[in-house]
Image (cartoon, grey):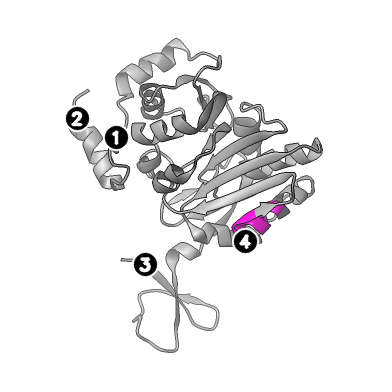
Amino acid sequence: MENYIIVQKGPFFSNLDKTQRHLKFFPLSSFMERLLTNDGSMTFFNPLFKEAYHSRSGALEEAFKKYIEPCKIASGMKILDVCFGIGYNSAAAIHKILSEKGTLQIVALEYDRNVLNNIQEVEVPDYLQAAYRIIQKAALQGSYDDGAISLRILVGDARQTLQGIQDTFDAIFLDPFSTMKNPELWTVDFFKLLKETLHEQGILATYSSSAIVRGGLREAGFLIGNGPIIGRARPSTLASLKRTLPPLLEQDEKLIVAFGRPFRDPFLNWSKENILEERERLPL
């Protein structure tokens, strides 16, 4: 059952009778707490997943250092942005291409319409405002295309929306909530879908260094390597079909052997609980 907060002339009240006519009810998920990260950029806390959209070390720093740079974003590329959120990863890519007067196509997948509504409230640094205006327009309209920059946002469960995409991408930004909060998008079966959309020389980047994620990517047929260390103790993860990547360390390989039993979702419709339970049930 959806949780609600109740608004009466401004203040918020909880645990009141939903049938009271003078009160207005809003889904709890539509109200997101703003958070300031260490690089001065803002993010939100999602009340359903109970996690912030970005690392507290720096939301924009993470976008540029973990996605734009390792994916070698350049003019003419096509990007798949999985878990669009408030659009920082796409905005960082657009910013780079605007500075080069180039072209870029992005298809973005997002589950939560509420976060798209909150995009209109996001304040970004001056240098990013031109790129972020494109994000805000696309969030309102569902898409943006000026002939040079194209951005299309598909709302829904990424496991289903991805199956309707026929494009091949040069880069994939994989940015769900953490493995235990959002296992639906960290399964071998979802990774296999992503593999079908990635150009053989393309790069998939994710912030996660989880052995579960790395084991799943490898089983799905990806080559995997270490990404940059930004705001966390361990490096992020890069994956490709044929491209040479920075190698994993011996310790990384040991972690995959010990803890890398992946999540599975054979019909791409299992609940979070089913996915977690199935992993625990199966032997190593």
Give the residue at mark 3. Answer: 3
Earlier residue among tags 2 and 4: 4
Q: Quadrant of the C terminus?
A: top left
- Residue 220, by quadrant, is top left
User: Do callouts 1 and 3 mark residues in contact (Cβ within 8 Å)?
Assistant: no
- Judging by the rendered image, the residue that carries numbered circle 2 is 282
Mark sitting earlier along the chain (3/4): 3
* Residue 6 % position (x, y): 44, 76
Look at 40% across and 29% down and name the residue there: 213
Disc 2 marks which amino acid?
Leu
Residue found at x 71% / y 45%: 149
x and y percentages locating residue 146 in the rendered image: 74, 51
The reply to whether the C-beta atoms of the residues labelled 2 and 4 are less than 8 Å apart is: no
Name the front one of labels 3 and 4. Answer: 4
Tag 1 residue: 264
Please state which amino acid type lies under the numbered disc 3.
Asn
Between circles 4 and 1, the one closer to the viewer is: 4
Q: Pointer 2: residues within 10 angstroms few (<14), some, or many (20+)?
A: few
Residue 126 numbered mark, or none? none
Amino acid type at image mark 1: Arg
Q: Callout 1: few (<14), some (14-19), or many (20+) C-alpha neighbours within 10 Å?
A: many
- Residue occupying the point 39% across, 31% down: 192
Image quadrant occupied by the N terminus = bottom left
SS category of the residue bearing label 1: loop
Q: Which residues are magenta?
A: 134-143
Q: Position of residue 155 (x, y in %)?
A: 49, 54
Rate crowding at label 3 as few (under 14), some (14 to 19) or many (20 or more) other CA atoms within 10 Å: few
